Amino acid sequence: MSTFPQKHIDIVGIGASTLDRFIVVDHYPTGREVQQVVSSTTDGGGPVATALAVAGKYGARTAMIDSIGDDMVGRHILDDFEKYNVNTEAIQVERGAKSGVATILVKQSTGERAVFFERSTATEPEFLDTHKQLIGSAYILHINGRHRQLMRSAMAVAKEQEMIAEVRSMRAKVVESESKVPLAIAKALESGNLGVLDYYNMKNIISDTEMRQAISGNSEKIKEDDK
């Protein structure tokens, strides 16, 4: 499995990873018959997995969270992710389980598809601390409804990170605004809109407020120490 060489991941995906076998045919069989295929190919599948593979191919840093079997299909799925630069460290491989497989018949003339699939027998992936760290460092969480319990936990982490980012953004705006105050006061004094006495009265109010806050803070600390 690949590792996490980078500090941040652009996209973390939660979904089903499958192995898809595409078979292009002249027509769909209507009964018992033997038909030569036009062409065929095997590739990794699953909506979220496919999205991550495309993003990884074009340079995005992606990681997949899922559970698969330790069978030949599972090994092919991991190899396919690595081919498209999708990190697989968060994929749980279950011993003795079967990985998901889909066989897709594609009608050559119209592109219509008929899908036959076999679900993975791997148990639902558990939400681990490593998943929380991974999602917390990502810019995008991509889901499609699979692994619902894990998905809900992941969404809660993503929402928490969004709120933290919003608070940090607001704090940055406050700091930026506060940095402009001295210049505004200087301009007001220079233009005569603020008198010297008014300025000193304002400074006294600020000092008094800071002293009261300091006293209040010490009082709260004393109360905590007495508990």
Image: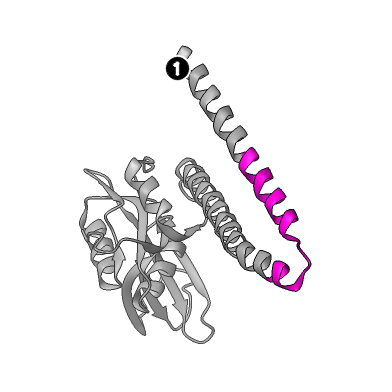
Position in image of residue 126 (x %, y %): 37, 40
Task: Determine the residue located farthest toward the right in the rendered image.
Answer: 193
Which stretch appears magenta? 187-209
Check the image and report above or below for 218 versus 144: above
Residue corresponding to mark 1: 225
The colour scheme of the drawn protein is one colour
Please report the residue visible at 73 percent of the width from the left and 54 percent of the height from the top: 197
Q: Is residue 217 above or below residue 29?
A: above
| Identity of the residue furthest to the front in this view | 197
At 60% from the left and 57% from the top, the residue drawn is 174
Magenta region includes residue 60: no
Residue 204 part of the magenta segment: yes
Q: Is residue 157 left or right of residue 6?
A: right
**Residue 186: x and y, percent?**
65, 68
Q: Residue furthest bottom?
A: 109
Callout 1: 10 Å neighbours few (<14), some, many (20+)?
few
Up-down relation of residue 216 to residue 51 (above or below): above
- Dividing the picture into quadrants, the one containing residue 207 is top right
Locate residue 210, reporting x and y percent: 59, 40
Give the side of residue 198 with respect to residue 19, left or right.
Answer: right
- Element type at marker 1? helix
Report which quarter residue 95 is drawn in.
top left
Residue 7 seen in the current view: yes
The one nearer the camera, 7 or 118, is: 7
Q: Using the rendered image of the protein, determine whether residue 36 is visible from the camera's viewpoint.
A: no
What amino acid is at disc 1?
Answer: Asp
Please state which of residues 112 and 155 is positioned toward the viewer in this rendering.
155
Which residue is rendered at x = 47% and y = 85% of the image? 108
Viewer-closest of 63 and 111: 63
Q: Position of residue 155 (x, y in %)?
A: 52, 48
* Residue pictured at 38% horizontal, 76% vertical: 23
In the picture, which quadrant includes the N terminus? bottom left
